[in-house]
Image (cartoon, rainbow, N blue to C red):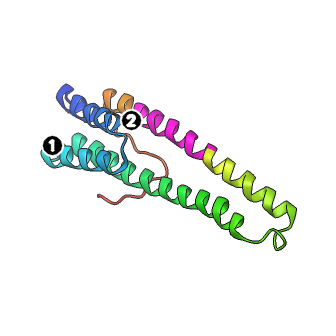
């Protein structure tokens, strides 16, 4: 089934809208409102907007989990008395928190790259699916 130019444009605009609102809750609300307006226009638009909403929610949950892990490894291990911690554990906690912080930076770049890939898929008329997302909106 071929998608019209209008359908492709609306799908791409939804991904661009998410890129312009990188604030966690704001991107979800903006894309959700966009979906409420355009969801009944075609199956192609509905698919892409649902994928975008699911991606935004999943990504925010993964980012929150990573921040919690960084907090645990940096603060909780530092609160324990140094006598209780072997040197290896203290160093590994620090390295793990630095690694998780690096992972958060990488995730930010991946977020833009995946939105760009989805935009290209929408331009080509393909039903793009994001990897590793939770399907909240079906």
Numbered mark located on residue 78 in the image: none
Residue 75 placement (x, y as % from top left)? 64, 62
Q: Is residue 74 left or right of residue 125?
A: right
Q: Residue at x 43, y 32 (%)?
A: 117
Most foreground residue, 106 or 101: 101
Magenta span has 113? yes
Residue 29 placement (x, y as % from top left)? 25, 50
Q: Give the residue at mark 2.
A: 118
Label 1 residue SS: helix
Numbered mark located on residue 38 in the image: 1
Q: Say few, some or many: other residues with alpha carbon within 10 Å of mark 1 (under 14 / 14 to 19 / 20 or more).
A: some
Counting residues from the N terminus, which is met first, the one under dot 2 or under dot 1?
Answer: 1
Magenta span has 71? no
Task: Specify the quadrant that holds the C terminus.
Answer: bottom left
Most foreground residue, 128 or 28: 28
Task: Specify the quadrant that holds the N terminus.
Answer: top left
Q: Residue at x 79, y 61 (%)?
A: 90
The answer to the question of whether label 2 and label 1 lie on touching residues, with beta carbons closer than 8 A, is no
Q: Residue at x 32, y 27 (%)?
A: 123
Residue 73 placement (x, y as % from top left)? 66, 61
Tell me: residue 93, above or below residue 38.
below
The part of the chain drawn in magenta is 102-118
């Amino acid at each position: 089934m071929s998608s019209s130019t209008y359908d492709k444009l609306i799908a791409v605009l939804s991904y661009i809208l998410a890129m312009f609102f990188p604030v966690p809750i704001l991107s979800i609300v903006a894309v959700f409102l966009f979906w409420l307006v355009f969801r009944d226009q075609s199956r192609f638009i509905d698919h892409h907007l649902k994928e975008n909403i699911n991606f935004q929610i999943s990504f925010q949950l993964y980012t929150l989990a990573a921040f919690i892990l960084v907090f645990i490894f940096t603060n909780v291990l530092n609160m324990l008395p140094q006598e209780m911690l072997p040197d290896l554990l203290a160093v590994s906690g620090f390295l793990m928190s630095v690694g998780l912080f690096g992972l958060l930076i990488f995730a930010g770049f991946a977020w833009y790259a995946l939105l760009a890939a989805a935009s290209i898929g929408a331009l080509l008329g393909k039903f793009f699916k994001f990897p590793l997302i939770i399907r909240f909106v079906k």
